[in-house]
Image (cartoon, helix red, strand yellow):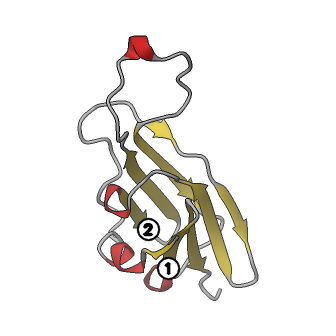
Amino acid sequence: MSMDLTAELTASKNPSTKLGASNGNPEAQLTVDVYQSANDVVVRSAIAGVEAKDLDITIARDMVTIRGQRRSSETIRTTDFYHKELYWGAFSRSIILPCDIDVERARASIKNGVLTIRLPKLDN
């Protein structure tokens, strides 16, 4: 399954919004890979089980914040678990970028549970 999240990026390019936890609940820190190609800085993260509507990406020239919610489709009592290793709930991650990027040309997609954000480098 592949999903283009570019439309969702348009509404969240304001770096002054959505950077703090709004309800005071603890959030898990999202794991990421950040690398560069000749023209882009690329951020990748495994977000299997997260629906696009539960994902918010905020982009500034020097930082990306990914925030979301992984919701369980079942309610299981804690006493019924033998092992409980999967994380369900809120998560976030802010990444300081190694160079300034072109916010307007940023693109995001999800394929096979992996979020990929491509951030074109600004010409220096």
Please give the name of the residue rendered at 25% of the width and 42% of the height, measured from the top-left corner.
22
Query: Outermost residue toward the left?
Result: 23
Q: Earlier in the sequence, mark 1 or mark 2?
A: 2
Tally the numbered discs.
2
Toward the viewer: 72 or 116?
72
- The amino acid type of the residue labelled 2 equals Ile
Classed neighbour count for the residue bearing mark 1: other residues with Cα under 10 Å, few (<14), some (14–19), many (≥20): many
Toward the viewer: 46 or 100?
46
Q: Which residue in the protein does label 1 denote?
A: 106
Left or right, 20 with reference to 41: left
Q: Which residue in the protein does label 2 denote?
A: 59
Label 1–label 2 contact, CB within 8 A: yes
Position in image of residue 31 (x %, y %):
60, 46
Q: Tell me which corner region of the image, top left, top right, bottom left or bottom right, holds residue 88.
A: top left
Query: Outermost residue toward the bottom?
Result: 123
Position in image of residue 28 (x %, y %):
47, 36
Please give the name of the residue rendered at 68% of the width and 56% of the height, measured from the top-left corner.
33
Position in image of residue 73 (x %, y %):
35, 41
Please give the name of the residue rendered at 65% of the width and 72% of the height, measured from the top-left corner.
41
